[in-house]
Image: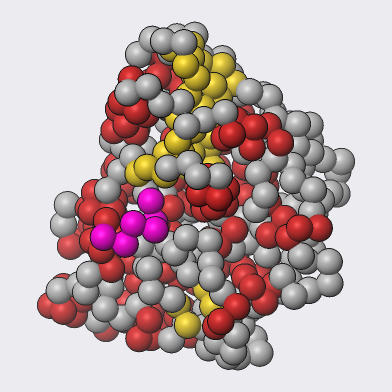
């Protein structure tokens, strides 16, 4: 279970509230990396990163002061005299990324409906992710050294134990992975999907879900408790080594630049395909879900709606990506150039000392690649174009 989740699944996002200012946080729609719709109360510790709201209290940090710029990847898909839009998102971001750029905003305005992986404000649909886990399963999967490792990471993230204790074990760990990049100014609350949902609702557009929360939970837990345990251990490895934070920053920059070529080569640098379990997870997260996502978009389009579909950016690249799948279904698909310049480097805050443990070492670099170079779609889908690179020394790595 690797960093690819940031570009694939919205359930990795979590609600954050500053414990001393709870009334100030009426967040972008409540979500959770696992549909954790309850708020994660953060401990009031000096070493804790600021909450999303508290981060806006810094000088010059009011969202309205930033000029919106286009980020991410955008395609248009035409068929039957109507246009559908495909927008590759990331499920965390910076406060200055919240406002959609002019090209993205115009495409949304020209659409009749917004389609997301999940509608996280549909609390009935999201219950599958917030239901208490079977205590026997929790006891089997979160005991001994693994439970101690989780407790250390939870403390390092300033998360009170009771906020996640009743969740499915894999969700308890993923809730922490969504917080690791806060020290670098990256917050789940500022994810692109949720910003678009706010914009759509403010203009009276309906928001639809292309998937169900129950299906996403099944995808995460895998086919057995042993597989879920392996995913938990892998996530804890990344948290303890600091690798997750490093990759979060790089991935966010790749997305913000609209770097489709590097995104398509993700398997070459993600360090996420080292074991059979990781390869099975990648297949479940991408190849197995993309046809369902494409079905939903095509169904809405055939029903007469001009759809703006915003899903994790890794769903867009490669021969099995959504642009390619829609091209194979008779859509004329083309990349829409986005004019955003790469974001100016943001000084990196010192990382809190990682909670250590004994046992497994973080995995080595991934070998080989299963992705095609570039973001080319099948049929008549055209490759996405990259934004201009930032001058040396300005890009964050």
Q: Observer-nearest residue: 258 or 201?
A: 201
Residue at image point 73% right, 60% down: 63
Give coordinates of residue 376: x percent, y percent: 53, 19
Residue at image point 54% right, 71% down: 26
The answer to whether any part of residue 143 appears in the image is: yes
Q: Observer-nearest residue: 112 or 272?
A: 112
* Magenta stretch: includes residue 212: no
The answer to whether any part of residue 241 appears in the image is: no
Q: Magenta stretch? A: 119-124
Q: Observer-nearest residue: 227 or 276?
A: 227
Please name the colour scheme applied to the rendered image: secondary structure
Residue 339 figure quarter: top right
Residue at image point 26% right, 60% down: 124
- With respect to residue 47, does 369 lie above or below? above
Q: Is residue 326 left or right of residue 387?
A: left
Magenta segment main secondary structure: loop
Residue at image point 62% right, 42% down: 255
- With respect to residue 38, does 117 lie above or below? above
Give coordinates of residue 203: x percent, y percent: 55, 44
Q: Observer-nearest residue: 77 or 278?
A: 77
- With respect to residue 13, does 176 lie above or below? below
Give coordinates of residue 335: x percent, y percent: 59, 21
Q: Quadrant of the N terminus?
A: bottom left
Q: Is residue 70 left or right of residue 362?
A: right
Give coordinates of residue 348: x percent, y percent: 74, 65
């Amino acid at each position: 279970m690797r960093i690819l989740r940031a570009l694939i699944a919205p359930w990795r996002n979590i609600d954050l509230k500053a414990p001393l200012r709870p009334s100030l946080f009426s967040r972008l729609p409540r979500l959770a990396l696992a549909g954790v719709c309850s708020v994660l109360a953060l401990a009031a510790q000096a070493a804790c990163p600021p909450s999303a709201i508290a981060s806006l209290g810094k000088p010059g940090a009011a969202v309205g002061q930033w000029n919106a710029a286009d980020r991410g990847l955008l395609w248009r898909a035409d068929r039957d005299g109507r246009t559908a839009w495909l927008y590759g998102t990331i499920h965390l971001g910076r406060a200055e990324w919240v406002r959609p750029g002019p090209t993205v905003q115009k495409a949304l305005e020209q659409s009749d409906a917004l389609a997301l992986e999940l509608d996280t404000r549909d609390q009935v649909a999201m219950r599958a992710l917030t239901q208490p886990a079977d205590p026997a399963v929790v006891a089997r999967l979160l005991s001994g050294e693994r439970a101690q490792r989780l407790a250390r990471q939870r403390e390092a993230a300033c998360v009170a134990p009771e906020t996640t204790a009743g969740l499915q074990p894999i969700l308890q760990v993923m809730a922490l992975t969504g917080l690791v990049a806060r020290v670098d100014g990256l917050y789940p609350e500022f994810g692109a999907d949720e910003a678009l949902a706010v914009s759509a609702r403010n203009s009276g557009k309906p928001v639809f879900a292309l998937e169900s929360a129950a299906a996403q939970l099944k995808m995460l837990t895998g086919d057995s408790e042993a597989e879920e345990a392996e995913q938990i251990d892998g996530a804890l490895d990344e948290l303890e080594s600091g690798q997750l934070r490093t990759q979060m920053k790089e991935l966010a920059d790749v997305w913000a630049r609209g770097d489709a070529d590097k995104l398509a080569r993700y398997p070459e640098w993600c360090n996420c395909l080292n074991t059979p379990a990781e390869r099975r997870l990648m297949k479940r997260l991408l190849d197995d879900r993309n046809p369902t996502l494409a079905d939903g978009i095509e169904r809405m389009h055939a029903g007469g709606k001009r759809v703006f579909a915003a899903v994790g950016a890794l769903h867009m690249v490669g021969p099995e990506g959504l642009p390619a799948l829609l091209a194979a279904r008779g859509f004329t698909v083309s990349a829409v150039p986005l004019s955003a310049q790469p974001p100016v480097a943001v000084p990196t805050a010192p990382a809190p000392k990682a909670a250590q443990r004994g046992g497994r070492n973080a995995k080595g670099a991934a070998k080989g690649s299963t992705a095609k170079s570039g973001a080319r779609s099948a049929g008549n889908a055209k490759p996405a174009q990259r934004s201009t690179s930032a001058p040396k020394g300005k890009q964050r790595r």
